[in-house]
Amino acid sequence: MTDVLAVTEHRRGSLRDVSFEVVTAGRELADATGGDLHLAVISGDVDKFAEQVNCDGVDQIHTVAYGEEFNHDVYTQAVEALYDDLSPSIVLMPNSVNGLDYAPAVANGLSLPLVTDVVDFEWDGALTATREMYGSKVETTIEVDAERVAVTIRGGEWPAANGTGDAEVTAFDADIDEGAIGSRVTGFEEVGSGDVDISDAEVLVSVGRGIEEEENLELVEELADALGATLSSSRPIVDAGWLPKNRQVGQSGKVVTPKIYLAVGISGAVQHVAGMKGSETIIAINTDPNAPIFDIADYGIVGDLFDVVPELVDEFQ
Amino acid sequence: MKVLVTVKEVAEVEDDFEIEGTHIAEQFLEYDLNEWDDYAVEEAVQMQEAGDDVEVVSVTIGPERSEETIRMALAKGVDRAIRVWDDALEDAEMLDVAAKTRILQAVVEAEEPDLVFTGVQANDDSFGATGVSLADAIDYEWAAVVNALDIDTLLAENVANVHRELEGGVEELTEVDLPAVLTIQTGINEPRYASLRGIRQAQSKEIAEQDLDDLGLGLADVESDLILTDMYEPESESDATIFEGDAGDTAGQLAEVLREKGVGAE
Ligand SMILES: Cc1cc2nc3c(=O)[nH]c(=O)nc-3n(C[C@H](O)[C@H](O)[C@H](O)COP(=O)(O)OP(=O)(O)OC[C@H]3O[C@@H](n4cnc5c(N)ncnc54)[C@H](O)[C@@H]3O)c2cc1C
């Protein structure tokens, strides 16, 4: 009962990066608990996925061949069945959009406490987890007052596992109840194509909620023009309908890696940073000196964009 | 058809703040309707406007202070509201997902809605889990991170055709049987501002107060297995060069760096 069960994730025929990150995090925990690391591979081409994710540190892989794409009812049933069989101390899942579509159901179904979006942890007979609050402004320590726990880990916090492991792969019969499947995936849609592809741009001027009003967008448009840059944005600007979806940088928008990323009035939420942290040079203009965007910036101005941006435009005209 | 919308009043932190123990000191907090819940309320109100007989009820777990936020939801078109509070909740250091689930489960069992809308997450603690946990507890179907819902088909055929917003600009098209819980993502609609008329009408709408006893719950039901033991400002990992001076000075220094990197040179 010191084992760790980690669940992998795939989409449209490919394993997602988080699958390799849960292996690293799972190994870390299994070392601390003194147990084995079990991996679950559910739906799709499970044999191919099992081979790919058979990295150093994995002790056993359990495949559940049922359906093609992710379905939360199938995942929930499969993970619960594996839990009953293996009786692990920790069920480790990705804090991805699909992770959040089944992990809470698994935790509820198994009466396990749930800690989501974990960025660090320790095991000392029970789990202590680190997670952020208030849009990354503070970190918190959470002690779990139970012997078993369900955890979802934030993407990109643990390095991807590699190497070729020699875990045994076994097919697990999860006895999926088809009658309990009440949702069906009917397709996928790519969104955010259109006139410009911000992922091609060398210089991006990116605007966030600090701009306050749609009319004020003119200000950053002028700046982008003056710099010969392309205009992109954080999510709230697109949600408000001020810019089209193809301008959105982040987890659910585009991943960009320009030479220069100038963030104007953007706080640097984790879902935004996921889309721009690979930029060569990051510059931030923000009134809040504690805004998380400064943690990843190379240059910064702590100041009011309404004062700074016009001055910057003048410099280039 | 009845739609239950969960609504949370969340604390927003000022730029400069202080931590007292495991909390942010009260004077640095401002309270507002959770951003995601604003979209959930709007989606429910749009259903009510599109359907012949759709009732929208909101439920909040929160102290008396949250009535202001609840009135805003009522002003936007929610028909009536439930506010769950209890001394036991006042004393609780933290309500984890399981505890919230048990409270909301009791409300669902009393109200028997066809649909429950929650926000994807609350922007204070960002667990992002209550909606799906609740769905499992009440034996409803569900979909997480919904950024499109076909309301006409829903009303006509009792099935929810949704888009789930996945990572990387991909959306999953999914059919969800009713009854269901949908966790609503920002951008699914354009939340309205409350009209003056709405605000006036909200004054006479019901906010039913319920304590644990009313819901048939006991102290053990709201006990959390998660204990918040520390809160701190993360050490800054920043090695950014911060330009000093007034707006003109800082813009000048930034311009120099940009020019060095070949920006604006034509
Ligand atoms: C499932 C999911 C997916 C998501 N996907 C994405 C995504 O793809 N992309 C994305 O961006 N977000 C995404 N988000 C949302 C994300 O969590 C944040 O809410 C969002 O990134 C915040 O945008 P922002 O920084 O513009 O706004 P805020 O966080 O509100 O920040 C505004 C900033 O502007 C500063 N400011 C205010 N006034 C001024 C001024 N006058 N001058 C200078 N600075 C000023 C403030 O100090 C603040 O730091 C997602 C969330 C979820 C749950």
Image (cartoon, coloured by chain):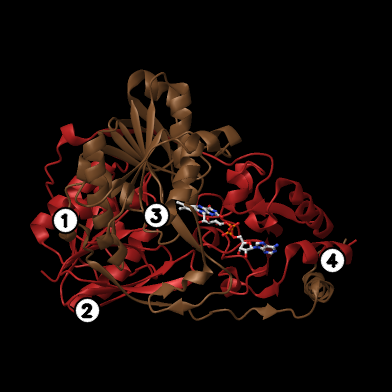
Chain colours: A red, B brown
Name the mark on residue A32: 2
Which amino acid is tagged 2? Ala
Front disc: 3 or 1 = 3
Front disc: 2 or 4 = 4
| Chain of the residue where label 4 is placed in the rendered structure | A
| Chain of the residue where label 3 is placed in the rendered structure | B
Is tag 2's residue or tag 4's residue first in the polypeptide sequence?
Answer: 2
Q: Position of residue A277 (x, y in %)?
A: 56, 65
Label 3 to label 1: alpha-carbon separation: 21 Å
Label 2 to label 3: alpha-carbon separation: 45 Å
Q: To which residue does mark 4 refer?
A: A311
- The answer to which of A64 and B235 lies nearer the viewer is B235
Name the mark on residue B218: 1
Asked if ligand 1 lies within 8 A of label 4, the reply is no
> Callout 1: helix, strand or loop?
loop
Q: Position of residue B186 (x, y in %)?
A: 50, 45
- The answer to which of A59 and A22 lies nearer the viewer is A22
